[in-house]
Image: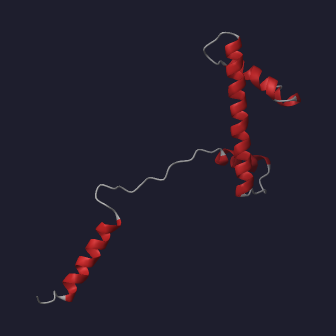
Amino acid sequence: MPPAPATASKGAKKASKAKASRPAGDKKRKKKRKESYSIYIYKVMKQVHPDTGISSKAMSIMNSFVNDLFERIASESSRLAHYNKRSTISSREVQTAVRLLLPGWTCEL
């Protein structure tokens, strides 16, 4: 059997490599979005301290803090609604939860 021309075999190799890297029917996976408050934390920080930066580790800590605070407010609001035999969390429950959770002057809004 005579060998195939060099140009044809190179093209065949390239075509087979492109198909071999991704099996048929497989699509490129989309990057899963991760929700965070980092852009909002950054914007507020720049309003308060325009010349200050923040590291990614500090941003991660702040993001965890905000998530924790929202989770506490939500659970306390849910508990208050349950105590009062209500099925809906209203602004009143949220406001009361904030007053119970946050100490001192921070809840006087």
- In what quadrant of the picture does the N terminus appear? bottom left
Q: Is residue 30 left or right of residue 67?
A: left
Could you say which is closer to the camera, residue 63 or residue 38?
Answer: 63
The residue lying at 77 percent from left, 53 percent from top is: 50
Residue 57: name its quadrant.
bottom right
Q: Residue furthest top?
A: 85
**Quick check: 72 above or below 25?**
above
The residue lying at 74 percent from left, 22 percent from top is: 95
Percent position of residue 84, x then y: 70, 10
- In what quadrant of the picture does the C terminus appear? top right
**Quick check: 87 above or below 56?**
above
Could you say which is closer to the camera, residue 20 or residue 53?
Answer: 20
Q: Residue furthest left?
A: 1
Percent position of residue 39, x then y: 65, 48
Could you say which is closer to the camera, residue 91 or residue 29?
Answer: 29
Percent position of residue 32, x then y: 50, 49
Q: Residue furthest right?
A: 104
Q: Is residue 60 left or right of residue 3?
A: right
**Quick check: 52 above or below 74?**
below
**Quick check: 82 above or below 36?**
above
Percent position of residue 13, x then y: 27, 78
Q: Is residue 94 left or right of residue 87?
A: right
The residue lying at 68 percent from left, 15 percent from top is: 81
The residue lying at 68 percent from left, 39 percent from top is: 67
